[in-house]
Image: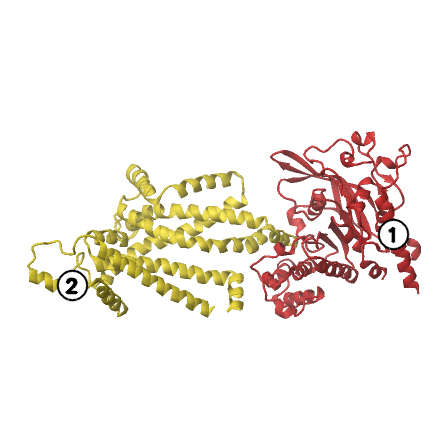
Chain colours: A red, B yellow
């Protein structure tokens, strides 16, 4: 698959666009998850925190959607809402989450038991704390199989060992009876993935699954997730703040800022043709091998979501901000069938601005390398 | 595990030796003589001193003392029940005290655990606030104050229970008379267990592995039962030691308040009467109880926590 070529560096995003091209003969894809205008607020002593303020995105069968954004942008809250595991002080104040036609926001806790872990699974950020320290690894995998799928002990054990093999745990029979403290971080994340896969879900949500791991292990885990995705025909939502990770795994990307999606498109759209100043800033603040000068960083801090700003939340930190950005939130402007961004810069009356120089240079370099890669491949 | 157990047993024996030595020294250093009557004929005194080897240097006395104990001879009572072997005196009292302590502990644990769970699950709700308030009261007020308060209110004012323990009574009357001593002894431990478990549970319930358990498809009830409970009960083993000893020491006083003929009263009497062999036997009895509790907790920790059990085995 094309996917295999793009993995070595972030600089060469996947050929997702090629694969998605209907002209290439791909079957029309079905939406599996549809989030519409989802808004989630938290009641705190300080007031109501508007963590997610009306976000929408779709997940298609068999694709990987990456949700990118810095801490506090509402990524994790969104997926917790999808899984129905929001904390008690959180409330879904608007919107809907349609999974195969059912609105998950309307489900009762009991009804969620048939979905959570069975059809939609979650891989955690920190594998070190995600496993119960005093329960055997095998037991933690079989538990859900036995309790909610009603499998027998032996059957569940066989299935667990098979799963452990699928996530490349050596000697699964021996490992089955060990405890989490006898596993390394990467191994534990493999176990967490195995648990997520236990009842053959359709959607796998990965919440920064590599953040807590060191870089070499990160690559292995990303590879494992990509491999499992193709082999098991999973749809994956990948939450991350690391664009480098996104480049390797995502078909489509949604960039979030302050509880809203600000730009969405295919991986190619966002890496080569980003339109939102926040996406520019994110791309510019990422080091690559050519980075010599001081790395760009976005000035200021994300807004306090107790008092979200009236206009574009990014305006305060945005060198390209127009006056209207401070008063009125920009709507989504369509750039292509796959690509749209919420910035006034795309308004027909907006002044033309140049993208940051760092970014232009970087894209040029990427294009060059990609062309070279393709040439090398053709030969 | 076997090696670990042996290590613990050796440590226990050594601790006991230290306790014996200290008990021996402290008692010999006490002022006064074991003979209150100063007009005894000198010959009789000499005979008596020779009998109890009081005419020997202290170090020799100590050697005899240890030798006798190793030989299983703890001596006889010299004042309370003259010439009766000390353990026999003690045996008569142990069941009463032990019954009181064990029942108090047996009540404190489940009640405390339930209260802790309730407080944690309804965190910051009315139930939690009520329990937390009572916990503060019960933790800070010592058991003998409760004993007196209970005697006054339930016993004297309301007349619900007999004011003192009635060992001779039969059936219901006897059980009724034991209610207040046990209540006085168990309120503190209940509060301590509840407070501890509440803290542990709240921490565990909000842990990532609880979330994982729920995203696995376990119901909140299953997840709490299977993941949070066991993990929270584990550290509880840690506070049972000080709790057991505190019930024991608390019962020294509470036994006197309710006139319970237990070991606590006996200890006070034997000290007053300079009945040294008996005092030492009681001290050793209390020490043994504490040491055994610690041993049980240490060993059970290994059984419950795989990080101790398996990790320890790897290092052996």
Give left or right: position of B25 versus A202: left
Percent across and percent down for residue B40 are: 7, 57
Q: Chain of mark 2?
A: B
Residue at the disc numbered 1: A365
Examine the rendering and report whether any part of residue B106 can be seen: no
Residue A323 versus residue B102 in the image, above or below: above
| Frontmost residue, A347 versus A218 | A218
| Frontmost residue, A131 versus A304 | A304
Percent across and percent down for residue A303 are: 71, 36
Residue at the disc numbered 2: B55
Compute the Cα span from label 1 to label 2. Answer: 101 Å
Q: Secondary structure at mark 2?
A: loop
Q: Could you tell me which residue is drawn at 45 percent across and 55 percent down?
A: B238
Examine the rendering and report whether any part of residue B226 can be seen: yes
Residue B288 versus residue A268 in the image, above or below: below
Label 2 neighbour load within 10 Å: few <14, some 14-19, many 20+: some
Label 1 neighbour load within 10 Å: few <14, some 14-19, many 20+: some
Q: Chain of mark 1?
A: A
Q: Could you tell me which residue is drawn at 24 percent across and 68 percent down?
A: B68
Q: Secondary structure at mark 1?
A: helix
Total marks shown come to: 2
């Amino acid at each position: 698959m094309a996917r295999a070529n793009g993995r070595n560096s972030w600089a060469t995003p996947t050929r997702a666009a090629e694969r998605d091209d209907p002209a290439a003969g791909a079957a029309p894809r079905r939406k599996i998850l549809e989030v519409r205008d989802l808004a989630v607020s938290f009641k705190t002593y300080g007031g109501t925190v508007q963590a997610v303020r009306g976000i929408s995105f779709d997940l298609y069968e068999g694709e990987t959607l990456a949700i990118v954004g810095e801490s506090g942008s509402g990524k994790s809250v969104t997926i917790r809402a999808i899984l129905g595991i929001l904390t008690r002080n959180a409330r879904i104040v608007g919107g809907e989450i349609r999974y195969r036609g059912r609105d998950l926001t309307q489900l009762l806790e009991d009804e969620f038991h048939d979905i959570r872990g069975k059809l939609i699974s979650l891989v955690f950020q920190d594998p070190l704390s995600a496993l119960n320290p005093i329960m055997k690894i095998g037991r933690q995998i079989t538990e859900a199989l036995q309790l909610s799928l009603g499998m027998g002990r032996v059957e569940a054990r066989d299935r667990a060992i098979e799963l452990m093999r699928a996530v490349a745990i050596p000697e699964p029979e021996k490992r089955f009876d060990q405890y989490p403290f006898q596993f390394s971080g990467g191994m534990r994340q493999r176990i967490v993935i195995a648990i997520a896969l236990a009842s053959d879900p359709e959607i796998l949500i990965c919440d920064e699954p590599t953040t807590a791991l060191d870089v070499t292990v990160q690559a292995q885990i990303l590879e494992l997730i990509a491999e499992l995705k193709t082999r098991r025909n999973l749809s994956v939502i990948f939450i991350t703040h690391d664009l480098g990770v996104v480049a390797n795994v995502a078909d489509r990307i949604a960039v979030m800022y302050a509880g809203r999606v600000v730009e969405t498109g295919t991986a190619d759209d966002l890496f080569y043709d980003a339109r939102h100043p926040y996406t520019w800033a994110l791309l510019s603040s990422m080091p690559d091998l050519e980075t010599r000068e001081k790395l760009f960083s976005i000035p200021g801090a994300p807004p306090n979501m107790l008092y979200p700003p009236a206009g574009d939340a990014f305006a305060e930190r945005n060198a390209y901000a127009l006056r209207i950005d401070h008063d009125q939130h920009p709507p989504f402007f369509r750039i292509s069938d796959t690509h749209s961004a919420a910035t006034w810069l795309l308004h027909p009356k907006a002044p033309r601005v140049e993208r940051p120089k760092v970014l232009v240079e970087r894209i040029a370099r990427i294009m060059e390398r990609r062309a070279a890669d393709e040439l090398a491949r053709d030969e | 595990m076997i090696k670990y157990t042996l290590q613990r047993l050796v440590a226990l024996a050594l601790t006991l030796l230290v306790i014996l030595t200290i008990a021996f020294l402290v008692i010999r250093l006490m002022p006064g003589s074991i003979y209150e009557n100063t007009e005894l004929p000198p010959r009789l005194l000499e005979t008596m001193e020779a009998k109890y080897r009081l005419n020997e240097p202290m170090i020799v006395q100590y050697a005899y003392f240890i030798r006798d104990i190793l030989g299983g001879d703890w001596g006889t009572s010299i004042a309370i029940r003259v010439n009766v072997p000390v353990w026999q005196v003690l045996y008569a009292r142990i069941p009463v005290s032990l019954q009181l302590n064990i029942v108090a502990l047996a009540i404190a644990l489940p009640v405390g655990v339930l209260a802790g769970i309730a407080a944690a699950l309804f965190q910051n709700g009315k139930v939690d606030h009520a329990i937390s308030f009572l916990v503060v009261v019960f933790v800070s007020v010592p058991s003998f104050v409760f004993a007196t308060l209970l005697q006054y209110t339930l016993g004297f004012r309301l007349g619900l229970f007999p004011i003192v323990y009635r060992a001779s009574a039969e059936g219901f009357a006897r059980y009724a008379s034991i209610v207040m001593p046990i209540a006085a002894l168990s309120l503190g431990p209940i509060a301590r267990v509840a407070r501890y478990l509440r803290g542990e549970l709240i921490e565990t319930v909000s842990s990532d592995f609880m979330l994982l358990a729920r995203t696995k498809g376990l119901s909140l009830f299953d997840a709490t039962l299977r993941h949070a409970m066991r993990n929270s009960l584990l550290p509880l083993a840690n506070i049972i030691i000080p709790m057991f000893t505190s019930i024991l020491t608390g019962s020294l006083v509470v036994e006197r308040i309710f006139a319970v003929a237990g070991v606590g009263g006996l200890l006070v009497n034997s000290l007053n009467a300079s009945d040294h062999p008996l005092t030492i036997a009681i001290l050793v009895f209390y020490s043994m109880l504490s040491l055994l509790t610690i041993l049980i907790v240490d060993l059970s920790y290994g059984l419950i926590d795989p990080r101790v059990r398996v990790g320890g085995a790897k290092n052996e």
